[in-house]
Image (cartoon, rainbow, N blue to C red):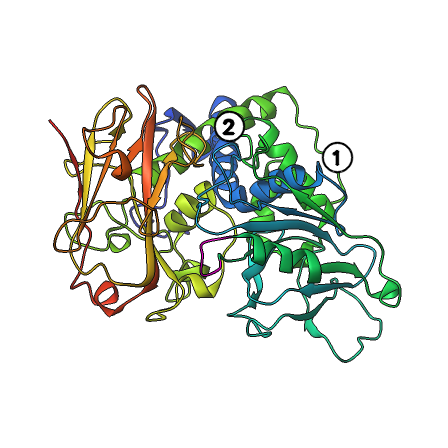
Amino acid sequence: MKNTTPIPAGIASPDRVETRLGTLSFFDGFPDDATVQKLYDNLDFQRAVQAYLLALPAVNLVATRKGLTQYGPENSTLLIWENRITPRTIWWLTQNVTPYSAMWIDLKDGPLVVEIPPKLLGFISDMWGRWVVDFGFIGPDKGQGGKYLLVPPGYKGEVPEGYIVVRPKTFEMNIFWRSFLDEHGDPKPGVDLIKKTARVYPLSKADSPPEFTFVNVTNEPVCFVAPADYTFWEYLNDVVQSEPSESLDPVTLGFYRSIGIKKGMPFAPDERMKAILVEAAAVGDATARALTYRMREKEAYFYENSAWRTILLGGYEFLDNGALILDSYSQLYFFGGLGISPAMEQKMVGQGSQYAAAFVDAEGRPFDGGRSYKLHLPTNIPVNNFWSVTVYDNQTRSQLQTDQDWPALNSQNKGLALNGDGSADIYFGPEVPAGKENNWIQTIPGKGWNVALRLYGPLEPWFDKTWRPGEIEPIR
């Protein structure tokens, strides 16, 4: 032909391409009908799995809302685990050393005043799981307590003076805080102070605040963990419909739109798409478990050839030079936790807390509830306050349910035996080792588990890694 240009290699499509999807067939670059169907099925599935992993924090928050509001309306009901959270509360990564309080906030009717008590440590998470503000010791009130004014998205009204003003990007959010034990180890004074001073009410009713309710849920059998089946997508659709599109980035919303979750439109997948979403939820959950329990990012591990790793690779925003670390974002923190704050990653020598998690033993094998293990914490454990060890269920990512009040030990436990050099040995297993009753955490045959080490008031040897915990060794 008169007009021809040589086509560089790699541009033209062969008539047949062998892939993991099978054979893809083309006529001069045009896919045939069977190939088109195969490719769209694959594209919808890929996007659904990625949407699942990106949506974990939002869906977790819907589950949290359901758990919190079953005890009373949003904006007016504060749940308090007055004697600390027990394993009967199914909630991610909880600990048993300080009382928790939590409530649900909805700003659709206008600004809310939140009166924060003194002597707390807490934060607010928005509906997409992002940090909004700290309060308490690390917040603007510096632990003195204060009046925060939460202003909804798009609010054009007057904002009065005298408040700590917070402008979240979503209407709904979760408030969470910890109070502390007194010098005698008693949680009651801190809880009483909360009941005396905590209040939430509309700004429009600041002169005559409505009733505010406190509910003690210490021993309540309540679940805050989201489902991993088709219901997951219904939870996600709830958030997309109720929150401003401007509250999330267009690419993530685009993933949701591509699978039929679009603001202002009913979520009604046909049978083909529903089958894809059911499978994608199963694969998404499985992928989150792989990322959590077999994390492949080497930077997540504190030490070479160690199981101990951070739950916050990339900090509270999970970023590496401006790029989202997807495997970190979708793994333990939003698969196995909820609520994030810059304070959780800050180096505060002698203050705050630091966390390390382990999901396999010293031989790289999953923990088996029917076997016994030993953890050695070397001498001079670097804490200004105390340390704790807590065991979690691999299924729920919540405290392991056993015959013990808590599947945990900490250095404030009465009777905890230390070695002569001040080091500590912790034992895990279905049967208590002879003479180790006060240093033993029970596990259940047939159930897997994982463990978190918390250091309260961590000292420099933790940060410079001159002190490190032992690996968790199987006892033979």
Residue 418 visible (yes or no) = yes
Residue closer to the observer: 115 or 439: 439
Question: Is most of the magenta stretch helix, strand or loop?
Answer: loop
Crowding at mark 2 (Cα within 10 Å: few <14, some 14-19, many 20+): some
- Quadrant of the snapshot with the N terminus: top left
Pointer 1 residue = 266
Where residue 179 sits, quadrant-wise, is bottom right
Q: Is residue 441 above or below residue 368?
A: below
Question: Residue 268: horizontal and vertical position, in percent?
Answer: 70, 29
Name the residue type under label 1: Pro
Residue closer to the observer: 398 or 188: 188
Q: Nearer the viewer, mark 1 or mark 2?
A: 1
- Quadrant of the snapshot with the C terminus: top left
Where residue 200 sits, quadrant-wise, is bottom right
Magenta stretch holds residue 56: no
Secondary structure of residue under mark 1: loop
Query: Which label belongs to residue 41?
Result: 2
Question: Residue 410: horizontal and vertical position, in percent?
Answer: 33, 48
Which residues lie in the magenta part? 182-186
What residue do we see at 45% from left, 57% from top?
184
Question: Residue 224: horizontal and vertical position, in percent?
Answer: 57, 37
Residue closer to the observer: 144 or 300: 144
Where residue 457 sits, quadrant-wise, is bottom left
Secondary structure of residue under mark 2: helix
Q: Is residue 351 above or below residue 195?
A: below
Name the residue type under label 2: Asp
- Judged left or right of residue 146, residue 303 is left
Instruction: Give the Cα distance between marks 1 and 2.
Output: 21 Å
Crowding at mark 1 (Cα within 10 Å: few <14, some 14-19, many 20+): few
